[in-house]
Amino acid sequence: MSELAEAVVVTESDAALAHPFVKQMVVQLRAMDSYGTYDTWSDARVLDPLVLTKERRRQIPVVGDPDETTVSRVKAYYNAIAQMVERETGLLAVPVINLTHEGFGRALILVGKLVALDKSLRDVHRFGFDSLGKMVEEAEKVLSKAVGLVKQHRDVAEL
Amino acid sequence: MSELAEAVVVTESDAALAHPFVKQMVVQLRAMDSYGTYDTWSDARVLDPLVLTKERRRQIPVVGDPDETTVSRVKAYYNAIAQMVERETGLLAVPVINLTHEGFGRALILVGKLVALDKSLRDVHRFGFDSLGKMVEEAEKVLSKAVGLVKQHRDVAEL
């Protein structure tokens, strides 16, 4: 890996760090860090690998198996969305991630008997966003769709 | 394994062999048999390992990781139920099996945005039924519950 790829992209001054979704992402990522690697890391550093600049993307092979850390980031992302769904609907939201070793599969968020989110996953070894801001944008889009579904079919979501 | 455990339990004269669910199970089990092991086997022999008599159960350790063949039987079972849900509702039913290496997890059948079936799985290495008849009984219970849900919430199942 080149020097460039190792350079930090997310800085402490990133405005997105204050966003509730990003804060929830940090909570989820730290919750999965069973070895305590992140204990001495700033939030910005914990989030940094989620941002894939063009330069970083170029360094990841097109085909590849996701490692455990990358898979845990995908899980953290959908856990965070599930948490936000819970907050906005007051109902339990359960994330279900189904992945093959090759990084293909689907992410579900279930609320009662309602599939509030159903997303195909592919190329999980390249999971990331252009910037933290872009991540927030994406997450909010997905979140509002999920919350909308719950509101529309509250009876099924309460089963 | 003792002689007793190897003795075949499901015989060609088992009335349950004619049941549509059992036939669907055979289809699903054969579909997963990528090495062609079952090619020369009768339906009864293909189904036989799904029947766990008391004697057979006694020979399986209480704690253990399920092997690939056992996991494929669990998948065949929920695939078969999903197929029956499709037949009875006319809607696409997608089975999702999420299992840890230790054989814990859940089985879902999704119809549109509806979770038609949601079942916790545990001790998957001991997956089996007292008899083929019992398997049919169980499957029909689960099936009628799933189909009932789809009928009740057809709008969500059609999403």
Image (cartoon, coloured by chain):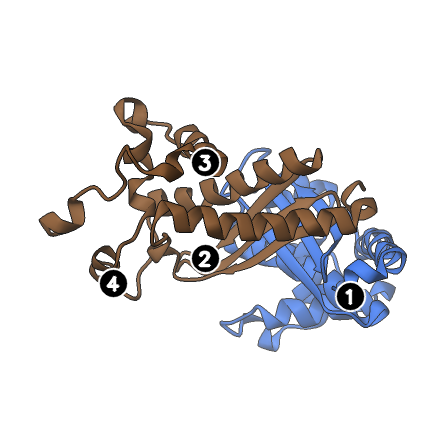
Chain colours: A brown, B blue
Q: CA distance from mark 3 to mark 1?
A: 35 Å
Label 4 is placed on what type of residue? Pro
Q: Which residue is mark 4?
A: A61
Mark whose residue sits in front, 3 or 2? 3
Q: Secondary structure at mark 2?
A: loop
Parent chain of label 1? B
Does the residue at mark 2 contact the one at mark 4 (Cβ under 8 Å)?
Answer: no
Whether residue A58 sits left or right of residue B15 in the image: it is: left
Classed neighbour count for the residue bearing mark 4: other residues with Cα under 10 Å, few (<14), some (14–19), many (≥20): few
Mark whose residue sits in front, 2 or 4? 4
Q: CA distance from mark 3 to mark 2?
A: 32 Å
At x 31%, y 65%, the residue is A63
Does the residue at mark 1 contact the one at mark 2 (Cβ under 8 Å)?
Answer: no
Q: Is residue B39 above or below residue B50?
A: below
Q: Which mark is residue A19?
A: 3
Share a chain, discs 1 and 2? no
Label 2 is placed on what type of residue? Thr
Q: Which mark is residue B44?
A: none
Quarter of image, res A64: bottom left
Q: Which residue is mark 1?
A: B158
Q: CA distance from mark 2 to mark 4?
A: 18 Å
| Between discs 3 and 2, the one toward the N terminus | 3
| Between discs 2 and 4, the one toward the N terminus | 4
Whether residue B2 is visible here, answered yes or no, is yes
Foreground residue among B124 and A18:
A18
Give how far across and how far down residue B4 sits, in percent: 66, 48
Does the residue at mark 1 contact the one at mark 4 (Cβ under 8 Å)?
Answer: no
Parent chain of label 2? A
Give how far across and how far down residue B67 sits, in percent: 51, 50
Q: CA distance from mark 3 to mark 4?
A: 31 Å
